[in-house]
Image (tube, rainbow, N blue to C red):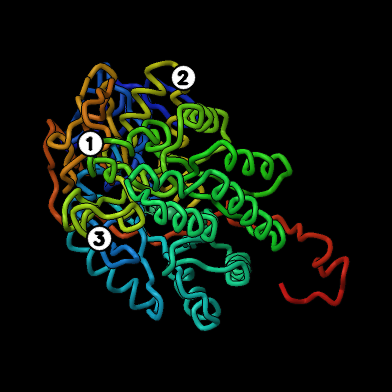
Amino acid sequence: MTELYDLVIRNGQTVTDKETLKQDVAIKDGKIVALGENLERGIREIDASSLLILPGGIDAHCHIEQKSSSGIMTADDFYTGSVSAAFGGTTTILPFAAQHRGQSLRDVVDDYMACAVPKSVIDYGFHLIISDASDAIIGQELPAMIEDGITSFKIYMTYNDLKLDDYEILNVLAAARREQAMVMIHAENHDVIRWITEKLLDQGCGAPRYHAIAHAQIAEKEATHRAISLAELLDTPMLVVHVSSEAALNEIRRAQKRGLKIYGETCPQYLFLTIDDLDKDGMDGAMFCCSPPPRDKESQEAIWEGLIDGSFSVFSSDHSPYRHDSSGKLAAGPKPTFDKIANGVPGLEIRMPLLFSEGVQTGRMDIHRFVAVTSTNAAKTYGLYPRKGTIAIGSDADLALWDPKKQVKITADAIHDNMDYTPYEGMVSNGWPITVINRGRIVIEDEELKVDRGSGQYLKRQRPEAAKPLNRLVKEIDPKTNFNAKFI
Ligand code: DUC
Ligand code: ZN
Ligand code: ZN
C-alpha cells in the first residue's frame, strides 16, 4: 500500500489564534495538506493524544551572530541559536543583518547569509538594522533589499554608533512608506540617558543597577511619543520594539485608539525580571543589563495587561546573548561601570514556555492570544502569513506539540544556547513543546535534535499588509489639502 502522506499527527487538538479543534493533521512535501478526521495513513504517524498542536513559534526579534555596536560578538551563532529556539518551540527566527556605518546593505546581507546558510536548523529571514541613513542607502540600497524580500528594518534613537536623529528618521519613514516595509524602532531618548549616565558616574554610581536608573522610563516614554509623532506625520506604520514601561505602552495605546497603524512588541524580560535583578551581588547584576531595562513590579503588571488586551501584538525574545565573562558582559574588564556592559539578555528558548506557563496555565492569558502573540501576528506583521504562523491547508507544516503536563526546570545547563547563564535560573515551566516540526521535518523529538546543520531555509518575505499606509497624511502636509506639498 502506498501512503498518501509523509506524516500524520493524530488524536491531538489543533490550536490557532482563533480556535481549538480536535482534528488530525496530514503533511506532505513540507506543507499541511489535510485536516480532519479519519485521514489516510502517512509514512510516519505521531500519536498526539493529550498534546496540543500549535503553530511553530516565530521569534521576530533576536540577535544572532551579530556584533554589538562596540564590537562584541554574540555568544550564539546560527547553529546554537537556532537549536535553542527549536527546543523552545520556535520554528522561524528573524534576526538582524546589522549595518555598521559605512557598510553597504548588500555586503551586510551577503555576509550574514553566508553565516546563516550552513548553520541554521530552522527557517529564518532577516530584518536589517540601518545605522547609516544617507541618501544612497535610503534611496537606492534599501529599496533593492526590500524588493529582495527583506521587508522590515530596525532603527535606533539611542546608542552612539547606531542612533538616527529625527531628520534621518523622517527620511527612513518616508522610504518605508513608499516601499511598504515595516519599520521597527528602538525608542529611548539618547540625551536623557547620556545626561543621567554622566551624573551617576560623576558620583561614583557605576554598579549594574544604575543602568536601570540611567535608562529612565521617561526616556522611553518621550522617545516613543516622538517616534509615533514622526510616523503619524508621514502616515507610516511602525512597530515599537521591546516596550518595558506602562508610560510607553500608553503612548502606543493612544495612537492605536486614534486609528494609527502603530504596533507594539514586548519581551520576557519585562514580564519576569525587575530592577532588583540588576542589584545582585558583585557583577552578577550585569547579567540582567538590557535596554530598555526591566522595571518594577507595577510595570510588569502593566506589560502583562498590554499583552493580554491586545495593545502588544508581538512577543519576541530580543535574545542578545553575551556571556558573563571577558568575551561578553565583562569585555571592558572585570568590574566595568554599567555604561560599558554589553546590553542584552538571552531568551530564545524560554520565550514561549514561560509565557505558556505563567500566562496560559495560570488562566491569565487565553491560549489563542498566546498563539497570536508568539506566532501568527509576527507572520502578519513581517510578510510571512499565511505561509507561517497558522495551521491551515497550504501552510508550511511548522508545528509544536505541547505537553501541558511536562514540567521543566530552567537552568543554564538545561538550555541549549551557548550561554553560561540564564536570567531565569530555577524557574519551573509548566508545559513544554516536546515535538517540534519545521516544514514537515521533525526537528526536536525525545529531547533530541533530529536534523542537520544548515537544514533550515531562508525566507524571502512579502511586503506586509500591516505596513500599508492609511493614506491619511496630517493635514498640513497632505497634497490633497495643500497642493504645493509634493514631498511625500
Ligand atoms: N537592547 C537592544 O537594543 N538590543 C539588544 C539588546 C538590548 O538590550
Ligand atoms: Zn533595541
Ligand atoms: Zn534587540
Q: Residues within 10 Å of mark 1 (few under 14, many from 20)?
A: many
Alpha carbon separation for disc pair 2 and 3? 35 Å
Instruction: Kindly identify which residue carries mark 2.
Output: 364
Crowd band around label 2 with a 10 angstrom C-alpha radius: few (<14), some (14–19), many (20+): some
Does label 1 point to a residue whose CB lies under 8 Å from ligand 3?
A: no
Element on which disc 3 rests = loop
**Residue drawn where x is 19% and y is 48% of the image:** 324
N-terminal of the pair, mark 1 or mark 3, is 1
Whether pointer 2 and pointer 3 mark residues with C-beta atoms closer than 8 Å, the reply is no
Name the residue furthest bottom.
136
The percent coordinates of residue 113 (x first, y second) are 28, 67
- Please provide percent x and percent y for residue 478: 81, 66
- Give the percent coordinates (x, y) of residue 372: 47, 35
Residue kind at label 2, given as amino acid type: Arg
Kindly report which numbered mark, 2 or 1, lies closer to the viewer in this rendering.
2
Q: Is there a contact, CB below 8 Å, between mark 2 and mark 1? A: no
Residue 412 is left or right of residue 217, and the answer is left
Q: Which residue is mark 1?
A: 7
Q: Position of residue 131 (x, y in %)?
A: 45, 70
